[in-house]
Image (cartoon, rainbow, N blue to C red):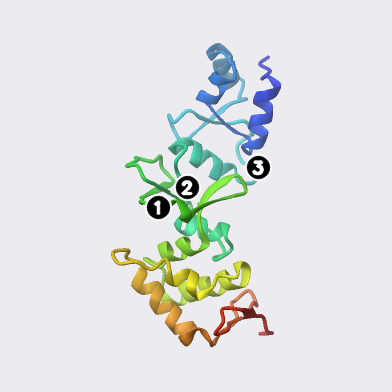
Amino acid sequence: MVTFPLHIRELVLAQSGVVTAAQLRAGGVALADVRRARRAGLLRPLHGGTGVYATFPEGLAPPDAALRAAVLACGPDVVLSHQTAAARWQLVAHGPPGLIELASRRELTPPEGIRIHRSRLRAAEVVPLDGFAITTVERTLLDIAIRFAPAALDRALREAEFHHGTRPEDLAALLRRGHRGSARLRAAIERHVPGWGRCAAGSSGGSAACWSATGSRSHGAT
């Protein structure tokens, strides 16, 4: 029977039940033990030949296992982005069905079920959240503006203000020439907060918020 060292078990626990072949090797686990663990069903390959393994039975994935596996399969410099990031920030109800969206500075060919957006993210546009690197709320709004319908983008803006206190000036500072989402995000801001002083209607989740001329906010009943 294969028994992994304590430090490997702690690593697996911290990574939502997911581990890579490289991490096992670096942790002193012999290749023969990895093979035995695979035959015994203790390690189940994920994402084809990427060297990422699940340590849990199929259908019993811990929370965040899919995200962790996607990040490990694509490399250390990828970050959660677009609709996947929007769901993590509670701007939308869920990520894209059957797909995880990541951003990277490198040209990558991802495994099935993962979409990589090539992006020259600025350092200030990436933050840590729950053990993941993720685009900021503001950058996430800019990215999803590319393909979100106006009504969906309006809802995401309201949720950003309600959950994270996102201010008009935070968004305006991010708009830049050449990004396909800039014009659409600017139009959404103008629709909902012309002059930075009008209330945005309550979201489907029941939140409502107002941006005042000074950038402060107040919450009212829907």
Crowd class of label 1 (few under 14; some 14 to 19; many from 20; radius 10 Å): some
- Label 3 sits on residue: 62
As shown in the figure, which amino acid type bears the numbered disc 3? Pro
Locate residue 195, reporting x and y percent. Answer: 47, 87
Whether residue 152 appears in this view of the structure is no
Given contact means CB atoms under 8 Å apart, are the residues at marks 2 and 3 in contact?
Answer: no
Rendered-image quadrant of the C terminus: bottom right
N-terminal of the pair, mark 1 or mark 2, is 2
Given contact means CB atoms under 8 Å apart, are the residues at marks 1 and 2 in contact?
Answer: yes
Q: Nearer the viewer, residue 185 or 176?
A: 176
Rendered-image quadrant of the N terminus: top right
Q: Does residue 116 sit above or below 163 in this rendering?
A: above
Crowd class of label 2 (few under 14; some 14 to 19; many from 20; radius 10 Å): many
Locate residue 129, reporting x and y percent. Answer: 59, 51
Q: Does residue 152 sit above or below 126 in this rendering?
A: below
Q: Nearer the viewer, residue 122 or 188?
A: 122
Badge nearest the viewer, 1 or 3 = 1
Secondary structure category for the residue under label 2: strand
As shown in the figure, which amino acid type bears the numbered disc 2? Val
Crowd class of label 3 (few under 14; some 14 to 19; many from 20; radius 10 Å): few
Residue drawn at the location 55% of the way across and 66% of the way down: 91
Badge nearest the viewer, 2 or 3 = 2
N-terminal of the pair, mark 1 or mark 3, is 3
Left or right, residue 173 beside residue 218: left
Q: Does residue 161 sit above or below 199 in this rendering?
A: above
Mark 1–mark 2 distance (CA, rounded to whole Å) = 10 Å
- Label 2 sits on residue: 79
